[in-house]
Image: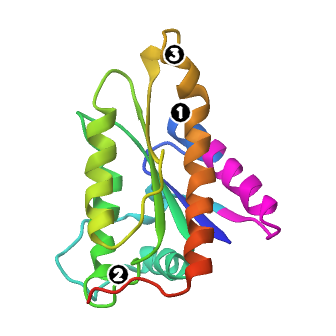
Amino acid sequence: MKILGFNGAPAKTGAVATLLSESLRAAAEEIAELGETPNTAVIHLVDIVKEFHDGSFTNIPTSLQSTFDSMSTADGFVFATPVHWFNMSALMKCFIDWLTSLEQDTCELEGKVVGVLAHCDEDGGNQAVTSILSPLVHMGMLVPPYCAFFKNKYMASRSEAGWQAVDHRLVGKNVVRLAACVQFNKRGWKLT
């Protein structure tokens, strides 16, 4: 089973990268429990998103092509972003805009499983998570339970700290669990 993680932070290390890595580690453990070879990878959007979406659905930039090819064979994804003014990062937004190329005519992302992680300093985590999930669900992706997670940096020492310390791992695990159900079903999802 193949699960890809997308780091929407401009930094390749830090809070967002750590949440994503831990979530993918949990995904790999879950894949191994299924008796399969784990295949997880982190893709740093700062390395591949080099230009804004130009409105075309066919002119995919070279920097994105191999990622899109890899996405078409993946079973699921974890999108991770810092929160910038109650929303996802500009890198993540630009990447999602480019995903329209995979959705427009071929619906290549339909039936793929997705979870979302967001890290915020103060507030806006819920808004960022839902602003990512809305277009992905519209593209036909499936969201398992407990896979819309945000971590508030300043709540680490308060009552919310307990669940924040472990719930991001549930994102990885539950993406794998639903992807396994989708693989078992094999009927897929249809627009009509």
The magenta-colored residue range is: 22-40
For label 1, the residue is 15
Asked if 53 appears above or below 124 in the picture, the reply is below
Asked if 134 appears above or below 26 in the picture, the reply is below
Instruction: Describe the element under mark 1 as helix, strand or loop.
Output: helix
For label 2, the residue is 102
Residue 118 magenta-drawn?
no
Instruction: Tell me which label, 3 or 2, sits earlier in the chain.
Output: 2
Q: CA distance from mark 3 to mark 2?
A: 38 Å
Q: CA distance from mark 2 to mark 1?
A: 29 Å
Q: Position of residue 74 (x, y in %)?
A: 57, 75
Q: Which SS does the magenta portion mostly show?
A: helix
Q: Position of residue 125 (x, y in %)?
A: 34, 34
For label 3, the residue is 156
Give the number of the mark in front: 2 or 1.
Answer: 2
**Residue in the foreground of this view, choosing between 177 and 125:** 177
Instruction: Describe the element under mark 2 as helix, strand or loop.
Output: helix
Instruction: Tell me which label, 1 or 3, sits earlier in the chain.
Output: 1
